[in-house]
Image: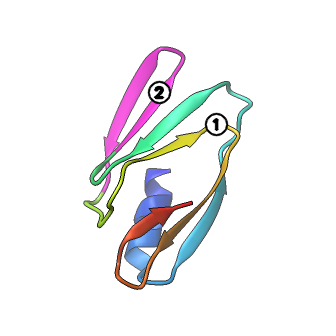
């Protein structure tokens, strides 16, 4: 997920990637912040740094969900 977000950020404004989070391994949550991605799974937590992003809110992504990661015309990363 961190790689996908960095790809969108580096490709420039208007670029986007669609991603579906598999639910087969079980329930997990990914939190995306300005410079960090955190994954919580089965009472365990892991973090990785990502390039600092122009992001206004923290995003929570849930297993089984589908998301569009985009870079807007003003350079912000948005996940819908």
Q: Quadrant of the C terminus?
A: bottom right
Residue 26 lies in quadrant: top right
In terms of image quadrants, where is residue 53? bottom left
Q: Position of residue 52 (x, y in %)?
A: 25, 60
Percent coordinates x, y for residue 68 in the rendering = 60, 63
**Relative to 4, residue 22 above or below:** above
- At x 40%, y 63%, the residue is 6
How many numbered discs sit on the rendered protein? 2
Reading the image, the residue beneath label 1 is 63
Of residues 16 and 76, the one nearer the viewer is 76
Element under label 1?
loop
Q: Nearer the viewer, residue 61 or 35?
A: 61
- 73 with respect to 70 (left or right): left
Q: Residue at x 64, y 57 (%)?
A: 19
Residue 45 is one of the magenta-drawn residues: yes
The correct choice, above or below, for 63 with respect to 6 in the image is above
Q: Main secondary structure of the magenta part?
A: strand
According to the picture, the residue beneath numbered tag 2 turns out to be 40
Label 2 CA crowd tier, 10 Å (few <14, some 14–19, many 20+)? some
**Which residues lie in the magenta part?**
37-50
Q: How is the image coloured?
A: rainbow
Q: Is residue 72 magenta?
A: no
Disc number at residue 6? none
Image coords of residue 73 (percent x, y): 41, 85
Q: Position of residue 71 (x, y in %)?
A: 45, 74
Residue appearing at x 43%, y 52% in the figure: 2
């Amino acid at each position: 997920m961190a790689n996908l977000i960095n790809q969108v950020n580096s490709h420039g404004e208007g670029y986007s990637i669609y991603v579906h989070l598999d639910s087969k391994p079980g329930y997990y949550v990914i939190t995306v912040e300005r410079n960090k991605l955190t994954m919580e799974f089965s009472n365990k937590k892991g973090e990785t740094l990502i390039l600092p992003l122009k992001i206004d809110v923290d995003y929570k992504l849930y297993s089984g969900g589908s998301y569009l990661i985009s870079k807007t015309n003003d350079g912000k990363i948005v996940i819908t």
